[in-house]
Amino acid sequence: MTINRKKQVAIILATCIGIFLCMLDTTVMNIALPSIQNDLDINLNNLSWALNIYTITFASLTIPLSKLADNLGRNKIYILGILSFIVGSLISSMSNNLTFLILGRGIQSIGASIVFPLSMTIGINTVPMEKRKSIISILGITQGLAAALGPSIGGTLTQFLGWRWIFIINIPLMIVSLIICLIKFNFKEKSEDNGIDYLGSVLGIIFMMSLTLTLVQGKSWGWNSKIIISLIITTIISILIFIIWEHRANSPMIPLKLFKNREFTGSSIAIILSNLFLVAVTVILPTFFTKIQNKNELTAAILITPITGMIFIFSPIAAILINKIGPRLIISTGFILMTISYILFANINMDNIYYIVISCLILGTGYGIIAGPITVLAASNFKGYLLTSSQSVAGVLRQVGISIAVAIYVTGLSSNIAVANNNSVNYIKQNVIKMDIPQSKKQIIINKATKELSSNKSNKNVTNHFSKAEKDKLIRLNYNKTMKKYNYNIPQNIKSKIYIEVQQKVNNKIKKINKQINHVISKIKNYALNEHSNAFINLYRYSIIFVALSTLSFLFFPSKNKKI
């Protein structure tokens, strides 16, 4: 191995670390939210901003900051990006309140918006054009693995080490990347003085910020609220002005001629759709396992690991096959497999681990088949600032796909769960009212069942629903009632016999009522579980047609691609 070859490998390793951690942190927090919420004593709605700040900043600043790096020197700016990511991770890991957590995530996301696109550009530029396909495939696989591994890594670290480790783990890995870069980078690089499109940058930031904010906060603020409607209008106006301006700008922030390349245009569409339907599973499914099936975070993480394995296997294979069979067949095959996985998720018994694993294997295979080629195709034959722009746009589009997935599926899930809760409460009332038990006991059961439903917790061990005091009170009431018939004027031995008989009758009645209550509670639990399971499953059931229609994205690719 020559020194030059060693330098290439070292730089590619450093950029892979950067890509992996930047993409990982878009989803790694999701499964740790309940733990963070309890530890910092904050409500989930406020905590969601620790997620949103990363997505919004990453999506908004990726293109302008990568463009700035072209003008000031990619390698120098890349180092600043790594340092920003390390500082942000450190602050996030040490946070004792929401303010510092959001601050840490914000600084981290600024670093990510630099590191992610420049990792792609720097990594690709380490090899000559004829060898770039294999490097692009490696970088693309890294992206797909990070997106899929987020919940798994987050669940494992939270389970064994605590939620702070989802940030701590970034620090040593980024330091390794930093050391490699400081040793191997050429800091006397020539910058590309293409000018800075200030107006385009501002318009781009406004567009991405308003779009992402609309997607991530639409549910919380209300899709019909004035602020969301204002954001939608701002998004539309800013993108229209942006397109008009970019056509006229001498040094556009996003060269629109990128989209004249069919491979890039097709890849852009496939990037959004494939990430949308991947994240719809990798983010939502762990919630199903932990909240509905009461599995721990580690088990939830393990159950979706097959997705990651298949991405790792099939991404490079599919990338290699592009030149042999063309992008159309590969992309359509990937989306067909993702459609099959959604059909399975919508119809299988979710208590059967084998079915879940098979469905995840098929989803990971489908995404892997798409992820490898689209990373290669998005780079096309671009060089210089066009290559940087293509990777910046691709990175933003991934974030858009993830944001759309979270907006649609989290909102849909919340809506479905609200309907499931309402149906379950009505079912509880209907069944308890029919029971032949005291009215006071009916209300207690309704209140208890409704409370368990809202907290998603149940006490499976309670089979006796009468306390000793309640039972003694019933015995006394029935004994006094019997004694009253005799005007209390009977011998003591007869009184004792009557008391024993009353006690036996009350015990038998309580036993009968307990059996009746337990039967109804069992029915209620099964009904509620089925309703909540359907709240998740229906998301995939209603999505099948849209995943299937995504298969048509292959039409945007040329029938035969140019060799890359």
Image: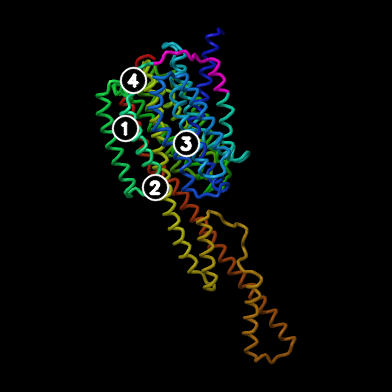
Name the N-terminal-most of marks 4 and 1: 4
- Which label number is shown at residue 481? none
User: Few, some or many C-alpha atoms within 10 Å of disc 4 (few <14, some 14-19, many ≥20)?
Assistant: some
- Which label number is shown at residue 195? 4
- Give the structural element (helix, strand or loop) at label 4: loop
Disc 2: which residue: 219
**Magenta segment includes 187:** yes
Instruction: Give the residues in magenta.
Output: 176-191
Taking the image as shown, residue 78 lies to the left or right of residue 496, namely left
Quadrant assignment, res 463: bottom right
- Label 1 to label 2: alpha-carbon separation: 25 Å
Disc 1: which residue: 203
Residue type at mark 3: give it: Gly
Q: Position of residue 526 (x, y in %)?
A: 51, 55
Residue 183 visible in the picture: yes
- Label 1 to label 3: alpha-carbon separation: 21 Å
Residue type at mark 1: give it: Leu
- Give the structural element (helix, strand or loop) at label 3: helix
Taking the image as shown, residue 561 lies to the left or right of residue 527, namely left
Disc 3: which residue: 106
Name the N-terminal-most of marks 3 and 4: 3
Q: At x 37% / y 45%, what residue is drawn?
A: 218
- Label 3 to label 4: alpha-carbon separation: 27 Å
Residue type at mark 4: give it: Gly
Given this view, does label 4 or label 1 mark the residue nearer the observer? 4
- Label 4 to label 1: alpha-carbon separation: 16 Å
Closer-to-camera residue (327/6): 6
Name the N-terminal-most of marks 1 and 2: 1
Whether pointer 2 and pointer 4 mark residues with C-beta atoms closer than 8 Å, the reply is no
Taking the image as shown, residue 351 lies to the left or right of residue 367, namely right
Q: Quarter of the image containing the C terminus?
A: top left
